[in-house]
Image (cartoon, helix red, strand yellow):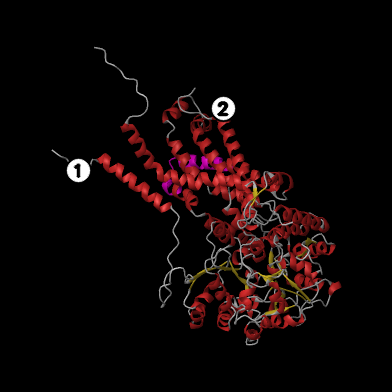
Amino acid sequence: MAVASAHRTGMTKREKRNQVVGLLFVSPWMLGFLLFAVYPLIAAVYYSMTNFDFIRVPKFVGLSNYVRLFTNDPDFWTVIYNTFYYVLLAVPLGVTVAFLVANLLNGPIRGRSAFRGIIYIPAIVPAMCTAIVWLFLLNVQYGAINGLLKTLGLSTIPFLSSPSLSKPSLIMIYIWLQGAAVTTFLAALQEVPKSLYEAAMIDGATAFRKFWHVTIPLCTPVILFNLIMGFIFAFQEFTVPWMLTAGGPMKSTELYAINLYRNGFIQLSMGKASAMAWILFLIIMVFSALMFRTSARWVYYGGEK
Amino acid sequence: MYNNSISRRRFLQLSAMASGAVALAACAPAGAPAAAPAAGGEAAAPGATPASVSYWYAWGNLDPAIEKIIATPEFKEHMGGATLEYKGNTNEAALLTALAGGAAPDAGSNYSYPNLYSRGATIPVQDMVNASTVIKQDDILAPLWKSAFIGTDMIGVPAIESYLWWGLNYNSDAAKKAGLDPDVPPVTWDETLEWHKAMTTKDDAGNLLTIGLDPYDAMAGEPDFAATSWGVKWYDEDTKQFDLNNPLFAESMDVMGEFIRIAGPDQFAGLRQVEGQGGWGAAYNAGVQDMIIEGYWHPGETQIQKPEVAQYNRATWAPVPAARKGAKIMATGAHFVMIFKDGKNQEGAFKVGEFLNTPTALDIIFKEVGWIHGVKSWLATVDPSTYPGLDFYIKAATEATDFVLGRRCPIQAFVITQYQELRDQVARDLMEPQAAADELQKRALSEWEAQGLS
């Protein structure tokens, strides 16, 4: 007797019940996501097309905030330059230094665990504390570094008060904060098969060649991850520059997020600030997309040829 | 057999539903709070005025004074049993967020008053003030009273601290040590520059040790000051016209920039970065800066914060160009208790503002914070020698020749930001003064239009 195999359409009662239960499980997160992520995104699109100062009813102005930013804003292009300068130098340097430090910490050195802990501490110190500490290290009058220089009878270095040194100083602080990247690199280095190093050694590879041809290729997925995360966060950098320099001297450290805050909360141009937020979102999206697109050429995933 | 027990699967399903319901309930907007019974009083009748007043203050200075004020029997009696929910250190970003979210406090102080009023966030108060038995127009310094108005609307209750803004405070001991006569303070910018040169010291390697005057520190950092010193009105609130490209205003950037050139722009910027962490006057208190252009609060605050420096403090008229020698410039502007349009207890908010004009409150504020308020009958009871330098401010009210009301422009914050950048460019010789002034004018006009104020 042939078994009639019924062609079922739709879900069974049990499957429907399971689906409802699943949705209920994720509903708290969904609610938070909708309220605190999706709604602000959509609201920002609306506000970016208005004149809105928190107090009066938003007045629709179309795309004029965007047009004004690109054509008539006194700060926008300065801010774009400052931010790209910071991001394009800080992130690659930060990732490079973190990778090198991780390689050092991966070796058989005495006190390795202690060093790993020390390297990670900056990543967990609140940003405000980081800023205050660095202010009192770098300040030209009272900083510890310049205090030492004065004691030696040398001229002080205006790390944060010279327009030409202020951004490099912020980049230096960014690099100091790469403890989290070091940790991820350490994890990646642990995964590199020792057999590859042994094979390379048998083939007569030097330490540098092992590093270049074995270590780096096998860590490229984590390098990509740290680069993308680094770019995303660096574009939105706010707390440390705001505390240290408030955008000065002479707007040399007026980064994108600082200018956005200034427009929204000090100058009451929340419409313009919302437009800036969306432009930044698009910049980060484009950057991330470019990174992913180019990654096929240089990122090696294990098992691929 | 009939099984009464619940399965693990069913337990998980029910728990998930309950958690979701709790999360949804927690996210629902809170209902209006029930009116709390006033301390020692009966529970409020339904629909009656709330028995609390929420009052937000932008800075933290007033906190010790408020604590003492609300403990006085006079305050309790004045408020009729209503409690004050005071929140200090609440900056304007927090206030704006509350306004946008429909959670405005009842009253607020030390925010950008013209900004908020011109956008409709606060209510005019002249009817309440006219009916008050505590606040009398005749008893308040006339320019202060005038500063409370935009057009014919009184934008807030002048209260807490308001007096005169511009005095050149100097350390007489530092002046003596620099070979200067502290009894003959400078009057013009040229004379002030000579004092600055004498007081500015560097070590052998050229590192800045002390400065005379930071020309853009504290109250001198606002365009009102430079404009008035040079006899210019950069913004006319009646005509809503800007005059930032006036050649005299341009000249001010060049002259004041010279102070920075002498000390070194990078060194100056470094000093300001640390000063910013401690608020105005930190460098003066530290003995690193020997002159500062500040207002009536300077003598009291310095005495409270650093009495060993305050003992040498003296105050005189702010400098003017040589061509205007003899002009005695002064500005004023009230601090207000503003009443928010969306506040729940506007009457209570007014009562708070009223009380902050009484001798009980003003005495406490004077002692705890060092501030004075332009209530003439109360000022007559103040001993000017309490804080060195205070006598200048008390006398200056009747002697000033150029009296202006400060901070009247709705885009003041924007203009100040652009002014800071452009005057720095002039001080570093990166831009000609007139070009900087022209650029400042252009940016101000553009922003005015963009904010829909034209």
Figure quadrant of the N terminus of chain A: top left
Assess whether residue A102 is covered by the magenta stretch: yes
Task: Assess disc 2: are there few (<14), some (14-19) or many (≥20) residues with their C-alpha within 10 Å of its C-alpha.
Answer: few
In the picture, measured across the screen, residue A206 lies left or right of residue B225, that is left
Q: Start and end of the magenta stretch?
A: A93-115
Where, by quadrant of the figure, is residue A290 drawn?
top right
Where, by quadrant of the figure, is residue B398 drawn?
bottom right
In the picture, measured across the screen, residue B225 lies left or right of residue B273, that is right
Quick check: A184 above or below B170?
Answer: above
Residue carrying label 1: B5
Residue B172 in sight in this render = no
Between label 1 and label 2, give the one nearer the viewer. Answer: 1
* Residue closest to the eye, B322 or B130: B130
Residue at mark 2: chain: A
Residue farthest along the right direction in this orientation:
B323
* Residue closest to the eye, A213 or B385: B385
* Residue closest to the eye, A208 or A243: A243
Residue carrying label 2: A297
Q: Position of residue B62 (x, y in %)?
A: 56, 73
Assess whether residue A176 is covered by the magenta stretch: no
In the picture, measured across the screen, residue A236 lies left or right of residue A17, that is right
Q: Dot 1 lies on which element?
A: loop
Quick check: A132 above or below B22?
Answer: below
**Residue at horizontal 25 percent and vertical 41 percent from the top:** B8
Amino acid marked by disc 2: Arg
Residue B71 in sight in this render = yes
Q: Main secondary structure of the magenta part?
A: helix
